[in-house]
Structure formats: C-alpha cells, structure tokens
Image (tube, helix red, strand yellow):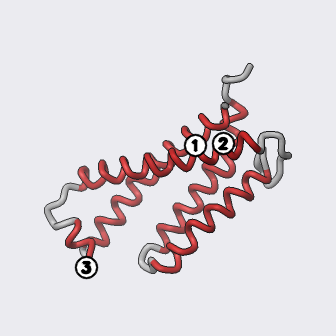
Amino acid sequence: MAEVFAGFVAGYGLAIVTTPLLSVWLLRLRAEGGLLARLLPEGSSAVGVSLLLHGALAMFWTGLGLALGLVLFAMRDAGAALGSRNGPFTLFVAGLLLALAAPLFAVLVRLRALIAAMFVAALIVFGWLTPYLAEWSKFEG
C-alpha cells in the first residue's frame, strides 16, 4: 500500500505549495470589489485567510491523493512511459485533472492563469511524482 501513502504525501505537498498561491490571488482579487470584497473585508488577516485555505486545500488534495493512490495500486504493474514509472496512470491523472479543471477554466475567466498553474502542478505531482514516491518507499521489503 505504498502507493496510497505516496498519494497522501503528494497531496499534502501540493496543499503546502498551492496555499500561498491561492491566498495571494484571492487577496489581490478582493481589491476589485464584488463578492470577494464582501467575503474578505479590507481588515481581513492574510494569515487567517491562509489558514482557512490550507485546511480546505489539505483536505481536498490529500483526499484526491488517497483516491489516486488506490488507482495507482490497482495499476501498479503497468509499464513506464512519458517519463513516468507508470504511463497509463499518468494519462489517467491527466484526463481526470482536465475534466476537473476545464469547467472551472471556462467559467472563471479571472482565475484562468491560477487554474492552469494548479493543473500543471497537480499533473506533475500526482501524475509523475506519485509513482516514483511509491517506488522509493520502504513499506514492502
């Protein structure tokens, strides 16, 4: 079950990386007014916003990482391709992330750069790094 733990670790690492990125982006968008100006008033603490976002992102990314770790466990004997230890898993992750990001990319015009950056980061971490983390682990052996 090294694959599941690798997915958890990859998800938590991604939560740590994406929290400051999303926090700064949200606080910058707050100045433009609208819904974010009402949700995050001018006196809102950036640390408080970051803590709330980190909690939510940690749950989301680690949950996705655990689910993808189970998929990787089921696909553990697939061959290497695309520079990954598990090519079919990398393609599966790319398709899943594309299905998650495409509607957001189409609807949230202001956040397109952020969505694209998170898509690429998640693809690299989950699709490429997770099979390597599972291989490097010392659970079975």
Whichever of labels 3 and 2 marks the residue nearer the N terminus, that label is 3
Are the residues at dot 3 and dot 2 in contact (C-beta closer than 8 Å)?
Answer: no
**x, y percent for residue 54:** 37, 49
Nearer the N terminus, badge 3 or badge 1? 3
Left or right: residue 39 versus residue 97 is: left
Q: Which of the pair 129/89 is nearer the observer?
A: 89
Q: Amino acid at mark 1?
A: Leu
Residue 16 relative to residue 122: left or right: left
- For label 1, the residue is 66
* SS under mark 3: loop
Find disc 3 in the rendering and name its residue.
34
CA–CA distance in space, label 3 to label 1:
36 Å
CB contact under 8 Å: marks 1 and 2: yes
Cα–Cα gap, marks 3 and 2: 41 Å
User: In the rendered image, which quarter contains the N terminus?
Assistant: top right
- The amino acid sitting under disc 3 is Gly
Farthest residue in the left direction?
43
Q: Which residue is mark 2?
A: 70
Q: Is residue 57 left or right of residue 26?
A: right
Q: In the drawing, does residue 28 fall left or right of residue 40? A: right
Q: Nearer the viewer, mark 3 or mark 1?
A: 1
Q: Quadrant of residue 3?
A: top right
Question: Residue at horizontal 62%, vertical 37%?
Answer: 4
Q: Residue at x 58, y 55 (%)?
A: 122
What x and y, as percent, mark residue 59? 44, 47
